[in-house]
Image: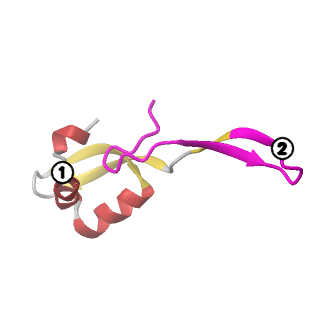
Amino acid sequence: MSRRCAISGKKPLSGNNVSHAHNKSKRWQRPNVQTKRLYVPELKRFVRLKLSTRALRTVSKIGLLPYLRKQGLQLKDVVS
């Protein structure tokens, strides 16, 4: 299962853990991706999406379809 936001495209980043002695070991910084069931009033139905919490906040403020339009996407591009 991909840890990627369907709308914003956020994905895991790799980097290093750096100790006090400056020893480095690889680590991952993973986005906070949640599977959510959202109601779309324009379509009068629910859709299931994998969203980052940042994208979920924006969808809550302006709505799913306006946010998709702003990102240049359509609903069929992001529905899982």
Majority secondary structure of magenta residues: loop
Q: Residue at x 32, y 64 (%)?
A: 58
Of residue 17 and residue 53, the one placed in the foreground of this image is: 17
Visual colour scheme: secondary structure
Q: Nearer the viewer, mark 1 or mark 2?
A: 2
Q: Which residues are magenta?
A: 1-26
Residue that mark 2 sits on: 23
Q: Hey, which quadrant is residue 6 in on the image?
A: top left
Q: Residue most toward the right?
A: 21
* x and y percentages locating residue 41 in the rendered image: 14, 58
Q: Amino acid at mark 1?
A: Gly
Quarter of the figure with the C terminus: top left
Of residue 53 and residue 48, the one placed in the foreground of this image is: 53
Q: Residue at x 17, y 39 (%)?
A: 76
Question: Is label 1 in a helix, a strand or a loop?
Answer: loop
* x and y percentages locating residue 79 in the rendered image: 25, 39
Q: CA distance from mark 1 to mark 2?
A: 43 Å
Residue 54: in magenta span? no
Residue 7: in magenta span? yes
Residue that mark 1 sits on: 72
Of residue 58 and residue 60, the one placed in the foreground of this image is: 58
* x and y percentages locating residue 72 in the rendered image: 18, 51
Quarter of the figure with the N terminus: top left
Q: Residue most toward the front?
A: 22
Q: Amino acid at mark 2?
A: Asn
> In the drawing, what numbered circle is on residue 40?
none
Q: Is residue 71 above or below residue 5?
A: below
- Is the residue marked by circle 2 packed among few (<14), some (14-19), or many (20+) residues within 10 Å? few
Question: Is label 2 in a helix, a strand or a loop?
Answer: loop
